[in-house]
Amino acid sequence: MTVAYFLLPLGLFGPQRPMTSWATFALVLILVAGLLIRQIQRDLLGLPGRPLVTILLLSCVALASFAAAYLALSRDGQFNGLRTRVDALYFTVITLATVGFGDVVPVGQEARVVVMLQIVYSLVFLTAGATTMTRRLRSLVEIRARSHHR
């Protein structure tokens, strides 16, 4: 997923194409949220499939989307200390982890809105996905433990 992030044509997004940038960002986040909810429902209903892999992949797509948005916003002077794809990915992970070292700072209003959106999005959708993955893994471990004790 990291390789895909570094290969994405992110030059297509930014201040020179604001409508395309915002529409793509919103569409990806809505699509990922919908697919995450669907996977969580499938897991809760016990339907077949590979929810762990799908939830992990969707979470990575969400993180890459936020990193791409931060990079695009940095081109418009919305961030202080964010210049490269690595900086954008770093800031995304730091924001997700709620650590915030202060070396990359959103200074523009749009950047601050996107940071707040990432925090709320992560709390709602990515946390729900992580909870589902944890519950599923615990269930698999319990099933294997019971089969080994027989």
Image: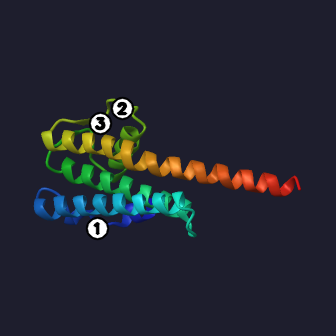
SS at mark 3? loop
Q: Is residue 21 left or right of residue 83?
A: left
Residue 92: percent from left, percent from top = 36, 45
What residue would you read off at disc 3? 104
Q: Is residue 141 left or right of residue 72?
A: right
What residue would you read off at disc 1? 9
Disc 2 from disc 3: Cα separation: 8 Å
Residue at 15%, 65% (x, y): give it.
20
Compared to residue 108, the image places residue 148 above or below, namely below
Residue at 73%, 50% (x, y): give it.
142
Disc 1 from disc 2: Cα separation: 27 Å
Could you tell me the amino acid type at mark 3?
Val
Q: How is the image coloured?
A: rainbow
What residue would you read off at disc 2? 100
**Quarter of the image with the N terminus in it:** bottom left
Compared to residue 100, the image places residue 7 above or below, namely below
Dot 3 crowding, Cα within 10 Å, few <14, some 14–19, many 20+: some
Could you tell me the amino acid type at mark 2?
Gly
Q: Earlier in the sequence, mark 3 or mark 1?
A: 1
The quarter of the picture where residue 115 lies is top left
Could you tell me the amino acid type at mark 1?
Pro
Query: Residue extending furthest front?
Result: 45
**Quarter of the image with the C terminus in it:** bottom right
Dot 1 crowding, Cα within 10 Å, few <14, some 14–19, many 20+: few
Compared to residue 7, the image places residue 82 above or below, namely above
Label pair 1/2, CB-CB below 8 angstroms? no
